[in-house]
Amino acid sequence: MKLLVTGGAGYVGSVCAAVLVEQGHEVVVVDDLSTGNADAVPAGAQFVQADMVAVASDLLGDGSFDGVLHFAAKSLVGESVEAPERYWNGNVIKTLQLLEAIRLAGVPRLVFSSTAATYGEPESVPITEDAPTKPTNAYGATKLAIDHAITSYATAHGLAATSLRYFNVAGAYAGLGERHATETHLIPLVLQVATGQRPEILVFGNDWPTPDGTCLRDYIHVRDLADAHLLALQTAQPGEHRIYNLGNGTGFSVREVIASCERVSGISIAARDVERRAGDPAVLIASSEKAITELGWKPQHTTIDEIVGDAWEFTRSRS
Ligand code: UDP
């Protein structure tokens, strides 16, 4: 297939673009490099450095594309609470413009990076796709708004659309991993303590209603996520918007993640308990039964040490 990948210089987008190229697809990456890295665009993909909205009509206009994978987004939860305008403009307004370019060019398929943050504080776990969607921050709210827009486009205009709601993405593949200028995610931060780039990891809250008092999250390997994107492209049906949660169905606590980082790196990691971080749910665990049944998705990296191991190899190679 000929595919446009927005945000293909970012973490998840670049891994997906690399896997698409490996599988023989023709890939065009568009990324403005506001947070991505040019050297993360896989060899074999064409790279257009631009705002996707400025170039979408031109790129898609000749009707030759079979699909768009839309990763480009602002994705810092804390920033989205403090400056929601950046998220409503940067995520929602821009995606509506992209959707118009897709409609006008008659592109048949869309895969969208949605998020577990669309659900907010869950009423029960594991979280299924029919759980209530009550996002607790602007990041999740903008992703949910986009999901609703995509449903309307699929219904009215025959788009074959899939939203993939990622839980905690981690790991690395083919030399591509998390390289955020502002790092907020647990695993890369803990590994930076292991390499000496940070003095300690702060544990946000030790009084949560969980077995060891720290939050539980469902970590999914970025390579397994890429497989789900390929399957979504292959199975999507015109006029339908399908939504899938993607995780491993197992929760690991912050302390368990730190212990895994110590096992994998062989380095003792300094950790300090501090106050809870605002907006953190105690437990987020996915039910991915729908993706397993309908997409035929099978995650290959299911232990925390495998996921952390690949992240560690990547971190070490760059430090
Ligand atoms: N966390 C932590 N210290 C940090 C960063 C994260 O204790 O420096 C915790 C956070 O409170 C959450 C878990 O680690 O319970 C995963 O956080 P992350 O930001 O990686 O992902 P999120 O679940 O917020 O999407």
Image (tube, rainbow, N blue to C red):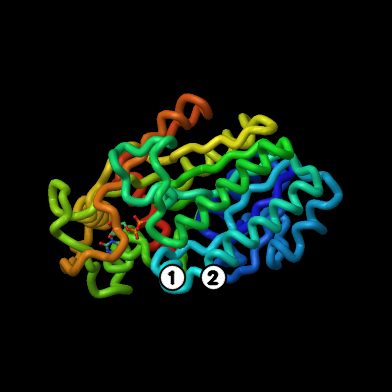
| 168 shown above or below 157 | below
Q: Quadrant of residue 38?
A: bottom right
In the shown orientation, is residue 155 left or right of residue 59? left
User: On the image, numbered disc 1 is attached to which residue?
Assistant: 79
Circles 1 and 2 in contact, beta carbons < 8 Å: yes
Number of the label disc, if any, that sits on residue 319? none
Mark 1: few, some, or many residues within 10 Å (few <14, many ≥20)? some
Q: Position of residue 213 (x, y in %)?
A: 14, 54
How far apart, in angstroms, are the residues tagged by discs 1 and 2?
9 Å
In the shown orientation, is residue 317 left or right of residue 87? left
Front-lying residue, 204 or 131: 131
The residue at the point 59 percent across, 67 percent down is 89
Quadrant where the image shows the C terminus = bottom left
The residue at the point 48 percent across, 69 percent down is 84
Q: Position of residue 246 (x, y in %)?
A: 44, 40
Mark 2: secondary structure: helix
Q: Position of residue 286 (x, y in %)?
A: 36, 39
Front-lying residue, 236 or 269: 236
In the shown orientation, is residue 217 left or right of residue 163? left
What amino acid type is highlighted by mark number 2? Arg
| 32 shown above or below 111 | below
Number of the label disc, if any, that sits on residue 86? 2
Front-lying residue, 306 or 237: 237
